[in-house]
Image: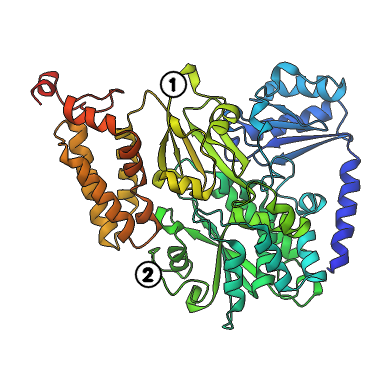
């Protein structure tokens, strides 16, 4: 297939889809399938036939639209009518009233309009809108036109210029400027060069990358193609944890379809450009999300970090130059090429452009997957998009950045979400987790929970992380069971900062964040535990008898 042929496919597919008056998009993501989404899909297919509207109504299997708490979700176009908690029993009424009579079933529609009002969906632009198993759906939405533009009219240097001008920073957590990283790999003369897309996503309760792969796999593939053209790579790997079976299946099919249309292989679109890719599976280790640990795992070794330098841009896979990018970063690339770096730089803030996807969970009325412009405040996310705390409970804290993120108090709710502001406050962007904590939680218990997680996930290679986190865990156990001392707080602070400064990789360097931020913002709870043997939430001292607490 040649460059011009892709436009013909797009035009044909657009005409085909316009032949339908309605399109019923049924979410069949990992979040909706356990609640009967496949039965709902079958019920819609049967219902449109029963009412004789199958020729004017397309029933499609799609990815997640983000409203995870009210699945299975169904979107009917035109009009983007979002139906919530759809069951097979409700399908017939929806088809009869909405499709046949043209009367949307109001009492079944999703009512939390504020959930979407402050979002800006760029990475998730196609989620819930296209069938991820059909490459034609992606092409009809403008997919792969960016790589065509690169191959037809742009030099590799021109591509890197646009990415640099966009201000895009890596969405995997570190926030390193994407264009700068591409320039480093492009300038190296050693060959071959490789690209690795990071889809490990080891943070508990975080599912943005998985959802992207399930909903819009070709956005990842096209981003990799453009990156490969820019830096001169001929081989790529998508590193994905084996616990994501639906995402794996979706990506495998997408890769096969892309190869079938000559979008991958030895002669991409008959331009002489060569790039191929394959999946590599991780075993679920949290540390495997660190870039040098990913390289070890792709090479077939244990996923353990190594010291840097040398950096992967100079010596990565098998000692060759390697570009490592999070899949969310890559999904932004086609938009930047199509619309220009200047356009992208105007989204978000002047120092932190674009959007960020977050898994919004915890004690929140509207949990789900959101995509917001950089610079939005935590208050807007929690109270406008998230709808506030259930049962009118009081807000206590928000954990930003996953298990190695920071616990921020109510006084920081007006903090803008960007890399620099979060880092200054003691949190991190991480892979995109926001956990809301209400007043029924104990912050000492919360910090203990995340410390335990990091202890379990430590690879044990470096002493600060391996031994330091265990020491922190022991101190927490003493504070929680009633034997803690005031001097333990100074020890926790000292140990946390030492682990942060001396650990080898990002896991150890960020693991103390929940400890340090709770000490910083919720010190009064630590003091109550130690001096009064009191836990406001009743989470601690459970192994002590009342008379033992009195004796302390």
User: Which quadrant would the N terminus be assigned to in this image?
Assistant: bottom right
Per the image, the residue denoted by label 1 is: 394
Q: Which mark is residue 307?
A: 2
- In the image, residue 119 lies at what x, y percent? 66, 37
Q: Quadrant of residue 518?
A: top left
Q: For the view shown, which residue lies furthest in the front direction?
A: 350
Q: Residue at x 56, y 36 (%)?
A: 377
Q: Is residue 268 above or below residue 489?
A: below
The front one of 333 and 383 is 383
| Mark 2 burial class by Cα count in 10 Å: few <14, some 14-19, many 20+ | few
| Mark 1 burial class by Cα count in 10 Å: few <14, some 14-19, many 20+ | some
The front one of 90 and 412 is 412
Q: Which mark is residue 544?
A: none
Q: For the view shown, which residue lies furthest in the left direction?
A: 551
Q: Residue at x 47, y 40 (%)?
A: 205
Of the residues under marks 1 and 2, which one precedes in the sequence?
2
Left-right relation of 99 to 374: right
User: Which quadrant would the C terminus be assigned to in this image?
Assistant: top left
The front one of 378 and 211 is 378
Q: Is residue 6 above or below residue 13?
A: below
Q: Nearer the viewer, mark 1 or mark 2?
A: 1
Q: Secondary structure at mark 1?
A: loop
Q: Is residue 459 visible?
A: no
Q: Quadrant of residue 157?
A: bottom right
- In the image, residue 166 lies at what x, y percent? 67, 58
Give yes or no for contact between labels 1 and 2 (Cβ–Cβ under 8 Å): no
- In the image, residue 312 lies at what x, y percent? 49, 71
Q: Is residue 108 above or below residue 425?
A: above
Left-right relation of 49 to 250: right
Report the Cα–Cα distance between label 1 and label 2.
44 Å
Colour scheme employed for the rendering of this structure: rainbow
């Amino acid at each position: 297939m040649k460059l011009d042929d892709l436009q013909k496919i797009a035009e044909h597919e657009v005409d085909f889809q316009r032949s339908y008056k309605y399109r019923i998009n049924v979410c069949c993501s990992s979040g909706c399938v356990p609640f009967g989404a496949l039965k709902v899909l079958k019920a819609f297919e049967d219902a449109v036939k029963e009412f004789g509207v199958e020729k004017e109504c397309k029933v499609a299997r799609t990815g997640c639209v983000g409203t995870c708490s009210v699945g299975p979700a169904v979107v009917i176009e035109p009009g983007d009518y979002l139906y919530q908690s759809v069951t097979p029993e409700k399908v017939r009424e929806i088809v009869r009233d909405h499709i046949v009579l043209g009367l949307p079933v109001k009492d079944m529609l999703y009512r939390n309009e504020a959930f979407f009002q402050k979002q800006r969906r760029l990475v998730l632009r196609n989620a819930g809108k296209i069938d991820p198993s059909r490459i034609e759906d992606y092409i009809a939405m403008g997919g792969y036109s960016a790589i065509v533009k690169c191959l037809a009219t742009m030099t590799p240097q021109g591509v890197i210029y646009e990415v640099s001008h966009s201000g895009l920073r890596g969405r995997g957590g570190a926030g390193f400027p994407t264009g700068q990283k591409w320039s480093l790999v492009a300038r190296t003369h050693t060959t071959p060069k490789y690209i690795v897309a990071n889809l490990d996503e080891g943070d508990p309760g975080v599912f943005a990358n998985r959802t992207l792969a399930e909903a819009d796999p070709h956005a990842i593939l096209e981003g990799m193609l453009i990156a490969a053209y820019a830096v001169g790579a001929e081989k790529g790997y998508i590193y994905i944890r084996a616990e994501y079976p639906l995402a794996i299946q979706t990506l495998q099919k997408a890769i096969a379809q892309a190869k079938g249309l000559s979008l991958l292989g030895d002669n991409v679109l008959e331009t002489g450009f060569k790039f191929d890719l394959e999946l590599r599976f991780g075993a679920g280790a949290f540390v495997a999300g660190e870039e040098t640990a990913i390289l070890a795992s792709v090479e077939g070794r244990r996923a353990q970090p190594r010291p840097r330098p040398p950096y992967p841009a100079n010596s990565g896979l098998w000692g060759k130059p390697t570009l490592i990018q999070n899949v969310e970063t890559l999904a932004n690339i086609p938009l930047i090429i199509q619309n220009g770096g200047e356009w992208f730089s105007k989204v978000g803030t002047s120092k932190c452009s674009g959007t960020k996807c977050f898994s919004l969970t915890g004690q929140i009325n509207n949990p789900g997957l959101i995509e917001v412009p950089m610079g939005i405040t935590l208050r807007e996310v929690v109270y406008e998009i998230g709808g506030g705390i259930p049962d009118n409970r009081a807000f206590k804290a928000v954990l930003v950045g996953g298990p190695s993120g920071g616990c921020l108090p109510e006084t920081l709710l007006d903090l803008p979400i960007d890399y620099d502001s979060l880092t200054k406050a003691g949190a991190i962007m991480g892979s995109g987790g926001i956990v809301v904590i209400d007043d029924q939680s104990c912050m000492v218990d919360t910090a203990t929970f995340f410390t335990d997680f990091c202890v379990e996930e430590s690879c044990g290679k470096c002493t600060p992380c391996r031994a330091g986190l265990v020491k922190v865990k022991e101190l927490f156990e003493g504070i929680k069971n009633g034997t803690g001392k005031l001097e333990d707080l100074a020890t926790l602070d000292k140990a946390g900062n030492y682990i942060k400064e001396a650990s080898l990789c990002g896991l150890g360097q960020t693991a103390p964040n929940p400890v340090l931020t709770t000490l910083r913002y919720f010190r009064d709870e630590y003091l109550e535990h130690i001096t009064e043997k009191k836990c406001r939430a009743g989470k601690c001292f459970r192994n002590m008898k009342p008379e033992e607490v009195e004796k302390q």
